[in-house]
Amino acid sequence: MVISEQELEIQAQNNVYETDDLIAQYCEFHYGNEYFSVKNFPVTCVQALMKNVQTNNITTDRALDLGCAVGRSSFELAKNFLHVDALDFSAGFVQQGAKLQAHNRLRYTVPVEGEIIEYKEVLLDKLGYGEVKDRIDFQQGDACNLKRQFTDYNVVFAGNLIDRLYDPALFLRKIEDRIVPGGLLVLTSPYTWLEEYTDKSNWLGAKKVNGENFSTLDALKQQLSDSFAFEEALDVPFVIRETARKFQHSVAQMTLWRKHKDNSMEFYR
Ligand SMILES: C[S@@+](CC[C@H](N)C(=O)[O-])C[C@H]1O[C@@H](n2cnc3c(N)ncnc32)[C@H](O)[C@@H]1O
């Protein structure tokens, strides 16, 4: 029997469960169950940053979700912003958000124990994103080397990204230009620096300087203070399921930085 391309596409949509371990883990983290009463991380982050957006009366035209992974924060941002660019280095990750956007459903499996797996399905309409999904443009991209078109954002959200970048300081230096004056840069991270991702010489803080502790927050303040006002820091816990009986429970620090409205720091002093 000859199967047409269209039928193949329908089969792919209907039958393929995402089984790549890390992708499936992130699908469950973003769209799956809540564990130990810890609220959904991407949703909580966007709700928290929106409080600041509202307090500061920041325009809600354009948002950038950097390191969006499988895209939950991008959909949540789309409830609030007219346009959302959603970028991730990993094409495999970003394709999951794009699949959900195109086909209104996502299927994946999660490990239970050993060979035993559980089948999961996520429906876009059930999540309440049906009306806003087309505001998002999912693309593969590098946060440290953004294409020119990614600019003029009212909000840039980088969720648990900085400690996974090869050059976080370069990212922080460059991102300023992509944010409109008065716009917001929102970073979250559990600051789990690993040489596997970031050469130790590029870690932001997380080290001793002249015998004193120099934390990532200290380094962020040092690096961002010329262009941004530090707004606030808050803790956002998250749980990532590994198997039915093994979980990672972490606490990210969310920091919010408001870009100065003109080039003069005096303006804000
Ligand atoms: C720890 S995950 C966090 C994902 C998601 N924001 C969240 O909070 O669940 C880090 C993400 O950053 C992405 N990433 C790593 N380096 C990147 C880069 N240079 N540019 C864009 N994304 C990158 C990874 O592919 C991964 O999806």
Image (cartoon, helix red, strand yellow):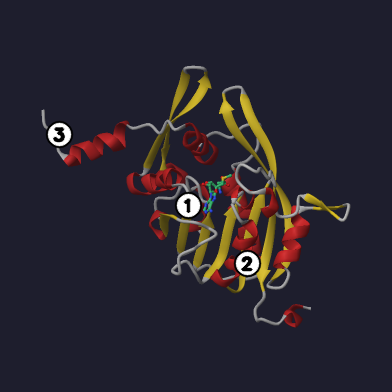
Q: What residue is rendered at 67% in x and 54% in y? A: 202
The kind of residue tagged 3 is Ile
Q: Residue 169 in the image: x percent, y percent? A: 65, 60
Residue at mark 2 = 173
Which label lies toward us, 1 or 3? 3
Q: Disc 1 and disc 3: Cα gap in Å?
A: 34 Å
Which label lies toward us, 1 or 2? 2
Disc on the earlier residue, 1 or 2: 1
Q: Is residue 217 left or right of residue 146?
A: right
Q: Residue 46 in the image: x percent, y percent? A: 58, 54
Identify the image quadrant of residue 19: top left
Q: Residues within 10 Å of mark 3 (few under 14, many from 20)?
A: few
Disc on the earlier residue, 1 or 3: 3
Disc on the earlier residue, 3 or 2: 3
Residue 17, compared with residue 161, is above or below; it is above
Q: Are marks 1 and 2 in contact (CB under 8 Å)?
A: no
Residue at mark 3 = 3
Q: Disc 3 and disc 2: Cα gap in Å?
A: 51 Å
- Counting labels gives 3
Q: Which mark is residue 44?
A: none
Q: What residue is rendered at 50% in x and 35% in y? A: 22
Residue at mark 1 = 75
The kind of residue tagged 2 is Arg
